[in-house]
Image (cartoon, helix red, strand yellow):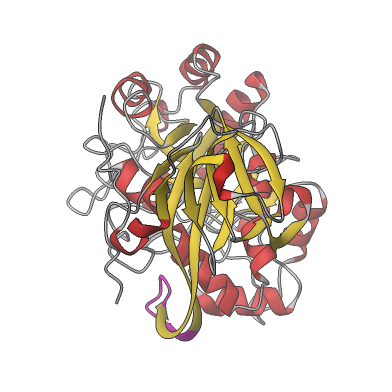
Amino acid sequence: MPSLACTLYEPAEPLLAAQTGGAAAYDLLIRGGHVIDPSQGLSAQTDVAIRQGKVARLAADIAESEARQVLDARKMIVTPGLVDIHVHVYDGVAPLGIPADPNCIAKGATSVVDAGSSGAHTFPGFRQYVVRLVETRVYALLNISVVGQSTLSSGNPFGELLDLRYANPALAIRTIEQNRDVILGVKIRLSRNIAGENDLRALGLAREAADAVGLPLMVHIGGTYSPLPKILAMLKAGDLVTHTYHGHEGGILDDHDRVLPEVRRAVENGVMLDVGHGAGSFAFRTAEKAFSQGVLPGTISSDVHQGNVNGPVYDLATTLSKFLHLGISLEEVIKRATSNPAKALAFPSGTGSLKEGATADAAVFELREAPWEMVDSMREKRAGKWRLRPVATVKAGRVYGNSVIPVYE
Ligand SMILES: [Zn+2]
């Protein structure tokens, strides 16, 4: 068994108390927390009782004596396990990959989607050496390029679609058909250093693969050869745009900082706007301008990888904290990292929810009120006030700690 050092993060240690005595009705009780579960419109102090890996009961006051173990979540926020639909965890193969467990499940994200690190040639290794071995529930969007994201690094600035012959719908379709339990869609990156002038042709090939398997397409925008409206015109309901609030050319704003009408039309047509913060893809300025015009993200993802895990992204919780600063309520922020992403892709039912009967994946956070300096991908700063700090994670009723003590700026 691969091991995440799954001891509880130190300050949380006394929170978990083993109960002794007679046969308990529940295996675990998450007690006294403020539960925010947008999948059932819940935001209230509630206890969560878990039995055999499933949520057994939600109620205001469940006796500790009814459970074998108690996780004391008083003064904490309890959410469904976070769902991060843009991460890179093909550690050792994609140069930007990082290990999944210390960066995902240990930080409250129980289900994550690796967005295109692997392509048809490298997916079997991803399945074998990542998905199968880690504790985090890892899914994938398959890169339309057979080599996935194995070519581009700071020492080799040549992306996976500069040679369009690597975009192979037939092999992508075959790989997806054989791995539908893990692969939830197709990924393509269209920046100039990745696709050169091939962006629209490459997108056409990704479109072909996604349509053939009936799954959504996630499109990475920013710094593209073709203008954004031409890219958006090729998207359909259910597709996702990631890096929506990037600060480079080819963005969602016109020269007068107005949201492009084509962006609004895409959203009306069912295209999902995803955040994908990343190292170069989230600008406070773009988000502030867009939010003031009512263009909010459908999903908030981190794009956490080698180039940003030590800042400015750190983890999904830190990204969520930035959206609190931008004026989105805690409930609406949590919705965009639980029930919304769960709806956006075909996860197993119950993902992103604490409804009775759902798999008992949960996350416990401290919502700390303390000044902190938030940094975006353009190195612009904002003065933050609230910060979500992961304290403990529960996967199928088992408690995981925060194995890596976060080192924040
Ligand atoms: Zn990415």
Res. 42 image quadrant: bottom right
User: Between residues 361 and 224, which one lies in front from this camera angle?
Assistant: 361
Image quadrant in which you'd find residue 147: top left
Q: Is residue 214 above or below residue 280?
A: above
Residue in view at x 49 percent, y 21 percent: 172
- Residue 193 in picture, x, y percent from top left: 36, 51
Q: Is residue 197 visible?
A: no
Q: Which residues are magenta?
A: 375-384
Q: Is residue 257 above or below residue 47?
A: below
Relative to 61, residue 133 above or below = above
Please identify the quadrant where the C terminus is shown.
bottom left
Residue at 38% over, 31% down: 118
Image coordinates for residue 162, horizontal then vertical, percent? 37, 40
Horizontal relation, residue 210 to residue 114: left or right: right
Measured from the top left, where is residue 236 in percent x and y? 73, 39
Q: Is any part of residue 372 visible from this angle?
A: yes
